Image: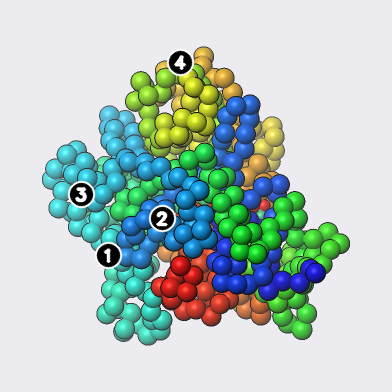
Amino acid sequence: MNTYDIIIVGSGIGGLTCAALLAKAGKSVLVLEAHDRPGGYAHGFKRKKYQFDGGVHLVSGCGPTGYQGGQVIYKLLQALGVGDELEFINADPFSHVYYPGFASALPQSVAAFVNTLAKHYPLQRQGLANLVRLCLQVTEEIALASEMALTDYDTASRLVPALCQYRKSTLAEVMAEYIDDPQLCSVFASNWPYLGLPPSKLSFIYWAAMLMGYMADGSYYCKGGFQNFADALVKGIRQHGGTVRLRSPVGKIIIEDKQVAGVMVNDTRFDAPVVVANADMRQTVFDLVGERHFPERYVQKINKMQHSVSIFVVYIATDLDLVQLNMAHESFYYRDFDHDRNFAQTLNGKVDWIGITVPTLLDPGLAPAGEHLLVLTALLPYSVKDSWQEAKQGYMDSIVDIAADYIPNLKQHINFIEGGSPATLHRYTQNYQGAAYGWDVIPCQIDPVRIRNASPVAGLYFAGHWCSPGSGIYGVSISGMQAAQHILGIKRPSELWQALL
Ligand SMILES: Cc1cc2nc3c(=O)[nH]c(=O)nc-3n(C[C@H](O)[C@H](O)[C@H](O)COP(=O)(O)OP(=O)(O)OC[C@H]3O[C@@H](n4cnc5c(N)ncnc54)[C@H](O)[C@@H]3O)c2cc1C
């Protein structure tokens, strides 16, 4: 009874995507999730009459028209037959950014984006337009590369020249080639916290893919909160014969004769020749499987990988009229244009810039009439504090202080407040040190050298932000798709969708 074709450890969006595609392909699938609800960082929670998102507040890849074969989330929901149950609300502009003496919206569509920023920096118009065009080219080439098995460098450099040319470049290096004004570079890179690294460290390729996702494919909020998205995937998995068990922490992945044989949840054994780990990768390799089962070089590589920072989140309900205050769904507030300095503050455990999300502007149903939800986020490393329990109140206070600089009278209008520290993020997902984005997307940790979806242990695969291609909901959806392709022996995404749609 406890035997399956495939077991998925973890119900983050990467794990659910993989499970859903495999269930749709006719495999018997079991998803085991430690928490009491699915979704990982996409999970939601209710307090009083307020529906909060634990982490995720904006995604791309959900629209019906895709850019060069994109829109994986849309296709996935269609394939499962649950697409009509969800409403993704478009967020245009996808961000607002604030610096001393500067404020701008970042609108969707390439033309609107370039025009908006060129009004502030007219002399940089051509360079900016060329840079955005390069980002589009990179995105097209990523889609092309995923459809082709490019093995030799000469062919690759002919077919995907931008990917080859810039695969080792940081965002800062490429911006410097196109834009002369350092202030515009900072503004262009304002959304870097989505990937947890400043432009001087961030992979240009991964940045380009993320930015074009939001700008060209479209930015969306899931009506009712992103828990609905995770729940819809679970429903789709179950409708296709799969099983999802919550409160089921996997304590061991069983290896017999050098091959995956199943997993243990407490004293219960579940058998399967294939296991997909959506859990933290260090946990998977060192605790669940055991490093002796992996080649030494693989273990060395895991030990050398750099993980992302975590996030401190403050969840607030307020009776302020945020529409009248011209707030937007998603905004970044910086006190300095220098993102290296901003990141250095983060690494030192100091909060002096924040992101503010107001999901009730797109979906008023998340709170009672007359109230809004505010989600304040600050990147922070887990390691800057010995006790997050002791440090929590101080961080909540300083994050609210900054928000109050931009939202007059905020402190007098807080009807509900709760904080989530890096320790909270770790507790709910078991991601190492509450890492928000898995392994950092620095140039030496992105494809083709990122940890692959197929592991060296027979039958063990990875899906999620600890493996290819990387972090964010869109990234882990692709990751789940890639893992499913490996398991089904399907090389190209187009063949997968042909078979499943
Ligand atoms: C505060 C915050 C805000 C973010 N905002 C956005 C955003 O707006 N847009 C965006 O695209 N990205 C955002 N991200 C990043 C994005 O949420 C993550 O990259 C992505 O959700 C990771 O998905 P995953 O599939 O790797 O799994 P995770 O979300 O990491 O989930 C892993 C799951 O595995 C389970 N698990 C772990 N170990 C075990 C075990 N032993 N047994 C059983 N289950 C186990 C965990 O309980 C968890 O449910 C945000 C991240 C954070 C932290």
Distance from the alpha carbon under mark 2 to that under mark 4: 37 Å
Q: Which residue is at 28% across, 60% downward?
A: 136
Q: Is residue 318 above or below residue 136?
A: above
Q: Which residue is mark 3?
A: 111
Q: Which residue is mark 1?
A: 137
Of the numbered discs 1 and 3, the one sitting upstream in the chain is 3
Q: Is residue 299 above or below residue 95?
A: below
Distance from the alpha carbon under mark 1 to that under mark 2: 17 Å
Q: Are marks 2 and 4 in contact (CB under 8 Å)?
A: no
Kindly report which numbered mark, 2 or 3, lies closer to the viewer in this rendering.
2
- How are the colours assigned in the image? rainbow
Say what secondary structure mark 1 lies in.
helix
Report the amino acid beneath label 3. Answer: Ala
Q: Which residue is mark 2?
A: 61
Where residue 455 sits, quadrant-wise, is: bottom right
Q: Nearer the viewer, residue 498 or 379?
A: 498
Q: Which residue is at 86% across, 62% downward?
A: 267
Of the numbered discs 3 and 4, the one sitting upstream in the chain is 3
Report the amino acid beneath label 2. Answer: Gly
Report the amino acid beneath label 1. Answer: Gln
Of the numbered discs 1 and 2, the one sitting upstream in the chain is 2
Q: Which residue is mark 4?
A: 409
